[in-house]
Amino acid sequence: MPDAPIYLDNHATTRTDPRVVAAMLPFFTERYGNAASVAHRFGWEAGDAVDRAREQVAALIGAEPSEIVFTSGATEANNLAIKGTARAAALQTGGIAHPGHLVCSAVEHRAVLDPMRRLAREEGWELTVVPCDGFGRISAEAVAGAITDRTVLVSVMAANNEVGTINPIGAIGRLCRDLGVAFHTDASQAVGKVPIDVEEDAIDLLSLTAHKIHGPKGIGALFVRRRGRRARLVPLVDGGGHERGLRSGTLPVPLVVGLGKAAELASQEGPVDCDRMRALRDRLDREIRSRLPEGGIRRNGHPTEGLPNNLNLSFEGVEGEALLMGLRGVAVSSGAACSSAGPESSHVLRAMGVPEELARASLRFGLGRFSTAEDVDRAAIEVAARVRALREGSEAGLLTRTGLARPDL
């Protein structure tokens, strides 16, 4: 039997922890009530489970349970935070279509960039996109330079989903608080791996999702500040007034329970998981380099302020799509995404100033709770072999084109 493929794409999604699955199962078949049904035991049991999950998620980020709004995932949470804040500000100014100014970073996930751009394009908002440094990091000073007296919202991710760089969100949050500007962070990749406290970091709105922390897909949450200067949102979905009127719709209780359990496990086991993943990440980097002694490898992202489970490498002298497609036994992601117009290199790597040919020849490795040293070693062998084969093929092709190769080669 061939070896099973190695999964090193945990930034895209994670395997659901069996303990999370076990917590969810009774709410499919035994305690299947609607959490909004308050007249009988089935509803009470569901409601209690939702309350418990709200407490577990809140504990992970230093929030109050009443500040947690359940969503279908981080994309919806980002949209609610961004569009909801902008439209609430418009209402406060008498419904003017473009009351002010928005700020985000150049390396945000498209779930932040796209709603920001839609508000600018369709509703007349002014948008400033703050550049990053060569490591993909956004400084508080750069954000300060972008804020004007018309700025309503700043959104900067806690940690980058491609290169793992961690941003100084505490400094950015405190800057925004001092200036009276709402601050949102997409913390999908950071929660459970980086200490986050919404009070200490002066965060007004924070997005997270279960499937990045070994929970189920289809459930996430938005932290909406209620203490002190409250965050004000206009809901995107109407109908029933669920989640304090901010997100109507029957709650998927099994998924909510799964998110809660995943958050609890992240709170309890995160530090140990992170130490182990950091060691595996460094081992993977070391093993790949040892098998390619000729070098030509660039590590992307901050050398010290990075996620413990992230390794993003660019390989000189190879074609990116051929590299990715040739890795049959390793599941990883490329720094390139495909659009309808054809392959497009990573906007994150471009913003960092990575040359186009290297941006297209990048691989993102994401370690997870269930990654092993054997996984890392097998992956290193296959990646190095593929890179070497592609480099040798490129060299042979160059010799043939220049007439320097023997005809029988």
Image: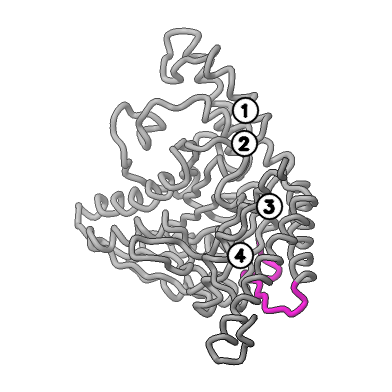
Q: Is residue 109 above or below residue 290?
A: above
Mark 2 residue element: loop
Give the residue number, with chain letter if any, for mark 2. 16
Mark 3 residue element: loop
* Sooner in the amino-acid sequence: mark 3 or mark 1: 1
For residue 71, side relative to residue 331 (left or right): left
User: What is the CA distance from the residue labelled 4 to the residue labelled 3?
Assistant: 15 Å
Give the residue number, with chain letter if any, for mark 3. 367
Kindly indicate whether the residue at mark 2 contacts the one at mark 1 (C-beta within 8 angstroms): yes
User: What is the CA distance from the residue labelled 2 to the residue labelled 4?
Assistant: 25 Å
Residue shown at 62%/36% (left/top)? 16
Foreground of the two, 212 or 181: 212
* Sooner in the amino-acid sequence: mark 2 or mark 4: 2
Give the residue number, with chain letter if any, for mark 4. 165
Q: Is residue 105 above or below residue 191?
A: below
Mark 4 residue element: loop
Give the residue number, with chain letter if any, for mark 1. 21
Which mark, residue 141?
Answer: none
Q: Is residue 263 above or below residue 290?
A: above
